[in-house]
Image: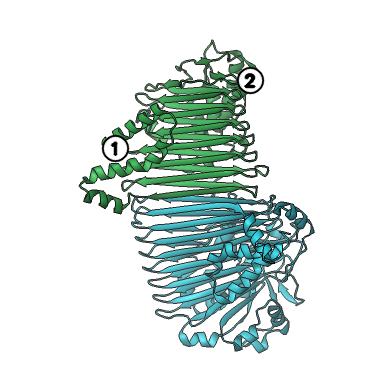
Amino acid sequence: MSISEDTIRQVETIGSKYSAGFVTDIESDKAPKGLNEDIIRFISAKKSEPEWLLEWRLKAFSHWLDMPEPDWAKLDFPPLDYQDYYYYAAPKTQDRPKSLDEVDPKLLETYEKLGIPLREQEILAGVAVDAVFDSVSVATTFRKTLEESGVIFCPISEAVQKHPDLIRKYMGSVVPFHDNKHACLNSAVFTDGSFVYVPEGVRCPMELSTYFRINELNTGQFERTLIVADKGAYVSYLEGCTAPMRDENQLHAAVVELIALDDAEIKYSTVQNWYPGDENGKGGIYNFVTKRGICAGRRSKISWTQVETGSAITWKYPSCILKGDESIGEFYSVAITNNYQQADTGTKMTHIGRNTKSRIISKGIAAGHSDSTYRGQVKIMPKAEGARNFTQCDSLLIGDLCGAHTVPYIESRNPKAQLEHEATTSKIAEDQLFYCRQRGLSQEEAVALIVNGFCREVLQKLPMEFAVEAQKLVGISLEGSVG
Amino acid sequence: MRFPKKKRYLPETADMFRYAPRDDIAPWLATAGKAAFDRFAAVGLPSSRLERWKFSNIATILKKYSADPLVYDAVSSDPHVRQGQADAQEAWVRELVDALPPNHEKYGDMALWDLNTASIQDVMVVDIPEDMIVKDPIRLDFAGKDGAFLPARLIIRLGARAQLAVIEHHEGQGAYWRNHVTRIVLGEGARLDHYRIQNDSPAALHLQMTAIDLAARAAYHGFTLTEGASFARHQAEAVLQGAQAHVAFNGINLLKDRQHSDTTLEAEHRAPSCTSSQLLRSVVDDQARGVFQGKVYVDRVAQKTDGYQLSNALLLSEGAEMDTKPELEIYADDVKCSHGATTGQLDSEPLFYLRSRGLSEQEARHLLIEAFVGEVVDQLADESVKTLVTERLARWLKR
């Protein structure tokens, strides 16, 4: 029995197995639908922002109005009606809770259901979490422990008030507001997100994590994350995301900026599990994310790891600008698409400094009617003597109705740079499947095992807490794609 | 406006050309030419906003020529070649001349093809009937002289199981502009070995497009040596229409000074069990720039496809540049497709080894470069071409 026959049958009978698809019934404060200058003023006022930030938002908005949408990605979706979204929604509470005891129990319950027990995690030392619900941050754990070591970890709206100098210096320095249409929109209407500053010589004592949740109907989520690692600092940051199952397509346009100074290291991991839409391609999140880091200092390092299993549309290219001499950029990615999902994702490594190194490992798995594209650029500037890049992108196709594409751009302008790129596309080998089946695994277990092996190089890069979750997610995402 | 609409074409370049067919041109060709010229004049030459022209900016090249603005009349000085019984008046020839290549809609960047149709005076036809195996290769010489615009349309048709080898030589003096279109149709089980030795003058523009249709079990073996022209564009696309067809695009780029050479290839698999391979070795010296854009497209029905691409580039000096874009677009699951690309300088270890055995730095470098392109040379089936390429390489290294 061939896989493809099974796939056709299975794709037809596949049920939605998205476990994070529930809705939390909670009252919320919403700005009116639509996007205009008044909404931006409203958001800015809600956050009691200083004048310069409002100016910046309005400048971004006026750019956004003229800017064309990026059309080069291999994605097919109807034009977005930006006036049909709510740009601000916040759970109704009096003031920002001072401790978890004051957080609405309904919210705590939501996060518990998602497997992010904020309260327990406070007790069982481990990960500090910033939970963002629709447009606002609802809780940040472990603040005290972090403060003791000098690490700032707080919602970005709070950082604007408390650390305006840092925000002014770094926000928009890696992703300028006019970078692209989606980043422009984010700069105009961003509502919350996390800010991390690790001071000179400090190794952040624990993993930091932000959990994003879209709850409200027709709401866009526009969060902004800014991480600065000062000289010799180290931080590992995790990001998770889910949304309820809804028939409408919801919009998520985030911006993430990372800055690593001399000898600093930032490790950024994402497990993206936004609602992918149902088996007929109805609903799901449009995920347009601009993520970029700059290795500004010598010997600095930025490492992106992503497991992308959700979203109806993924448009995302976490990139590194390797400016400091001997700096290192890494990109490890697993992108799984099933049903009618479309993912166009990859990275951009720009080598500016001498002896800069980058490594790209990308694994794409396409099943059902989905399309998965790796799009990446490695650019060696003339001064980047001794630069080194290694790229490997492998694609796996499950079934004959899906597509897998590889579009790398490799541009070298220095003879002393060395670049290697390799890519393969294939299906799961029959003999591997047969071997697993012979040893008593069901077809589905066997595929999950083989796919996990295929992604192992990337999954290993995830922090322990996430690695287990990601492995399970790989299995769930492919459920029903094979017999 | 802060964001002017990005121009995919350069409309002002259309003014460089005038539709001026000769009086004795066949009426059907005049009609086809006029229609094509109107299509071309409406858009102009492609700009680097078009994805397949991303790395090759015609506008900057033309600036070099714009000191003395030239208006090109279509003048064809090429020989009229005939083999077999074909006649340019025959319906099948007219159909091939009239139509754009099969996958033109995918990219919408066929302005140069239209310009070619508008400027040809006649069509060169090579038509080999079924089962005929032509022993000696056909040699086609394309000359060039200063100030000329040189369009040529070559049509090669091989009947079922026919075999042929074609060797093209491109040479000339002064600043001229070549805009060639080659249309190839291979019948079941036919085999064509197609060699191009491009040694155009250092001031020339060499633009050429080749579109190939392959029936079941047909095989196309293409090889291009790019050594000449200040700006060269070698674009070839094969559509594998029948099962078990095979296409191979091999090439060697030897670039120096401020040369720009763009190799854009596509193998489009539309039938099961076909194979395709692309192998390019580029040696880029001085301030030259090499471009390789290779694509393997696999349709849903094209199961059991085997597609392979490899581009290796050696950058010999500061200022040299290599841009590579090996692309896979795959819609069938039971396939084996892979690509590899490397860019770098000569390895220091083998250099050291050779020097420690008494070779001079230069001898050692030459030996390593010879070995680098050697893999492509070794695959050449025609001995005379093999000798020629080896000689040219030696001369290029000694320059």
Amino acid at the residue labelled 1: Leu
The quarter of the displayed image where residue A277 is located? bottom right
Q: Position of residue B196 (x, y in %)?
A: 44, 29
Whether residue A181 is situated above or below residue A464 in the rendered picture:
above
- Would residue B3 appear left or right of B203 to someone viewing this image? right
Instruction: Using the image, determine if residue A230 lies above or below residue B15.
Output: below
Q: Chain of mark 2?
A: B
| Disc ID at residue A30 | none
User: Could one spot residue B346 in this view of the protein?
Assistant: yes
- Which chain corresponds to the colour green? B
The colour with which the image depicts chain A is cyan
Q: CA distance from mark 2 to mark 1?
A: 45 Å
Counting every numbered tag in the picture gives 2
Viewer-nearest residue: B44 or A473: A473
Q: Position of residue A356 (x, y in %)?
A: 38, 61
Residue occupied by mark 2: B92
Q: Nearer the viewer, residue B192 or A143?
A: B192
Q: In this rendering, would A392 be left or right of B282? A: right
In the rendered structure, which disc, 2 or 1, sits on the residue that comes first in sequence?
2
Helix, strand or loop at disc 1?
helix
Q: Is residue A428 in view?
A: no
Q: State how the image is colored.
A: by chain
Task: Report the residue marked by disc 1.
Answer: B397
Identify which amino acid the numbered label 2 is placed on.
Trp
